C-alpha cells in the first residue's frame, strides 16, 4: 500500500489528474478500474476520480509493490534522477538568485523578466524564467522535489525572449487555475511600453486578423479575415512622448496572440525599434551603432488583476539610451 498526503500546492486538481501523474505509465482504464474496485481511495472512501483534491487529503493505493513500480517507475525512479539533475541545473550560474520579484503572495509570484531570457524553455538546457521560479521556490524551502512529481509551478503568461517585463507565476495549483481563468476571460489587463518609428499624436484602437506561419515562426496581419482563417486581434495604444522621429507608446494588449504587438504596429507603419522580425533592418543597425541597443524596445510595464491589484515595472535602461540618441539625431 502506498499513501500520499496532498500538499497545499497540489490541492485544487482533480483526483484522476493527480493519479495520472503518480501512475504515469498506467492506462486510464486501469486507474478508473482501481477506483471502482476501491483499490485506490480518497480519505478512506470510494472515489470516482472527479473529486477536487484539498490540502491534507489522503490518497491510498492498495496495489502490489510490483504493480505499483510497473506503472509508477517513470515517476519514482527515472524521475528521481531527473529531478536531482534539474535541481542542480537550476542552481547553476546563480539562476535562482537572478530573479527580480515584484510581488509574492501565497499563490502567485510576479517577476520582472529581463530581455534575452525565455519565459519557458524550448529545449533541454535552456535557461528560462519558469526554471528560475522553480529554483527560487526550491531554495527558499517553499517547494520540495517530491512535490515536483505531481505539481510544477509555472509562469502563466508569456513574453517573447527579447521582450522584458512582468510575468505572473503560479506557486500553487489554485494560483495557476485562478490566473489562467482570468487570462482566458481577459480580466487581467496587460499594458506595455514601446518605442516605435514615426510620429503618433492620437490614441488608436486597432483590429485585424493574425495568421501564424509555423515554418518561419512569424505572423502576418490582415485587415480583413483571410480565407485561410486567422485569429482576430485588438491592440490599443496611447502616445506618451515624442522622441524625434519616434514615439513612446503605452499599449493595451486586449487580445494576446503570438507577436501581436510587434506585427500589428509594423502593419500600420510603426514598427518597434530594434525588432529583428518585423522592424526596419537599416534603422535597427543604426540604433545599435549609435545607442548600443540590439533588442526590440518593448516592455510589459503594468498588470492589473481583476481583484484590483496593480503591478508595475519601470522601463529598462535601453529605452533611455534610445530616447537620448533619438532626441540628438
Image: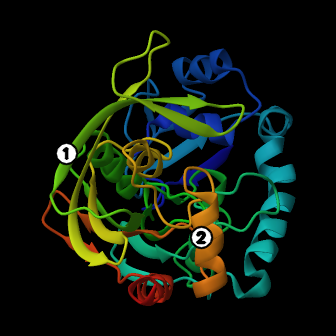
Q: Is residue 206 or residue 258 the one in the foreground? A: 206
Mark 1: few/some/many CA within 10 Å (<14, 14-19, 20+): few
Compared with residue 317, is residue 264 higher up or lower down, i.e. above or below?
Answer: above
- Depth check: give the residue in front, 286 or 320: 286
Q: Quadrant of residue 257?
A: top left
Q: Residue furthest front?
A: 329
The residues bearing labels 2 and 1 have C-alpha atoms spaced at a distance of 26 Å
Provide the secondary structure element on which disc 1 rests: strand
Question: Of the residues under marks 2 and 1, which one precedes in the sequence?
Answer: 1
Quadrant housing residue 37: top right
- Label 2, on which residue? 295
Q: Is residue 37 above or below residue 98?
A: above
The residue positioned 49% from the left and 66% from the top of the image is 273
Please provide percent x and percent y for residue 19.
Answer: 59, 36
Residue shown at 73% from the left, 74% from the top: 90
The residue that label 1 is drawn on is 205
List the single residue furthest toward the top: 227
- Of the pair 204 and 256, the residue shown nearer to us: 204
Amino acid at each position: 500500500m502506498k499513501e500520499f498526503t496532498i500538499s497545499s500546492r497540489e490541492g485544487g486538481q482533480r483526483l484522476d489528474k493527480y493519479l495520472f501523474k503518480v501512475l504515469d505509465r498506467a492506462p486510464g482504464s486501469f486507474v478508473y478500474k482501481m477506483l471502482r474496485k476501491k483499490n485506490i481511495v480518497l480519505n478512506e472512501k470510494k472515489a470516482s476520480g472527479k473529486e477536487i483534491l484539498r490540502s491534507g487529503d489522503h490518497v491510498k493505493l492498495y496495489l502490489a509493490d510490483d504493480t505499483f513500480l510497473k506503472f509508477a517507475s517513470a515517476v519514482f525512479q527515472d524521475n528521481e534522477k531527473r529531478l536531482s539533475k534539474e535541481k542542480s541545473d537550476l542552481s547553476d550560474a546563480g539562476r535562482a538568485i537572478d530573479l527580480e520579484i515584484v510581488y509574492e503572495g501565497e499563490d502567485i509570484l510576479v517577476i520582472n523578466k529581463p530581455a534575452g531570457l525565455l519565459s519557458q524553455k524550448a529545449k533541454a538546457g535552456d535557461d528560462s524564467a519558469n526554471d528560475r521560479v522553480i529554483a527560487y521556490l526550491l531554495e527558499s524551502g517553499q517547494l520540495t522535489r517530491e512535490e515536483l512529481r505531481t505539481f510544477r509551478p509555472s509562469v502563466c503568461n508569456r513574453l517573447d525572449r527579447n521582450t522584458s517585463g512582468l510575468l505572473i507565476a503560479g506557486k500553487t495549483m489554485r494560483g495557476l487555475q485562478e490566473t489562467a481563468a482570468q487570462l482566458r476571460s481577459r480580466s487581467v489587463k496587460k499594458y506595455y511600453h514601446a518605442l516605435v518609428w514615426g510620429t503618433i499624436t492620437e490614441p488608436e484602437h486597432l483590429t485585424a486578423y493574425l495568421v501564424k506561419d509555423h515554418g518561419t515562426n512569424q505572423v502576418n496581419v490582415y485587415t480583413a479575415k483571410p480565407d485561410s482563417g486567422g485569429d482576430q486581434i485588438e491592440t490599443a495604444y496611447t502616445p506618451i512622448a515624442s522622441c524625434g522621429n519616434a514615439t513612446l507608446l503605452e499599449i493595451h494588449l486586449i487580445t494576446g496572440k503570438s507577436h501581436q504587438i510587434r506585427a500589428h504596429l509594423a502593419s500600420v507603419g510603426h514598427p518597434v525599434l530594434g525588432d529583428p522580425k518585423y522592424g526596419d533592418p537599416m534603422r535597427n543597425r543604426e540604433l545599435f551603432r549609435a545607442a548600443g541597443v540590439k533588442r526590440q524596445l518593448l516592455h510589459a510595464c503594468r498588470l492589473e488583476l481583476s481583484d484590483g491589484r496593480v503591478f508595475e515595472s519601470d522601463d529598462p535602461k535601453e529605452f533611455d539610451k534610445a530616447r537620448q540618441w533619438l532626441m540628438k539625431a
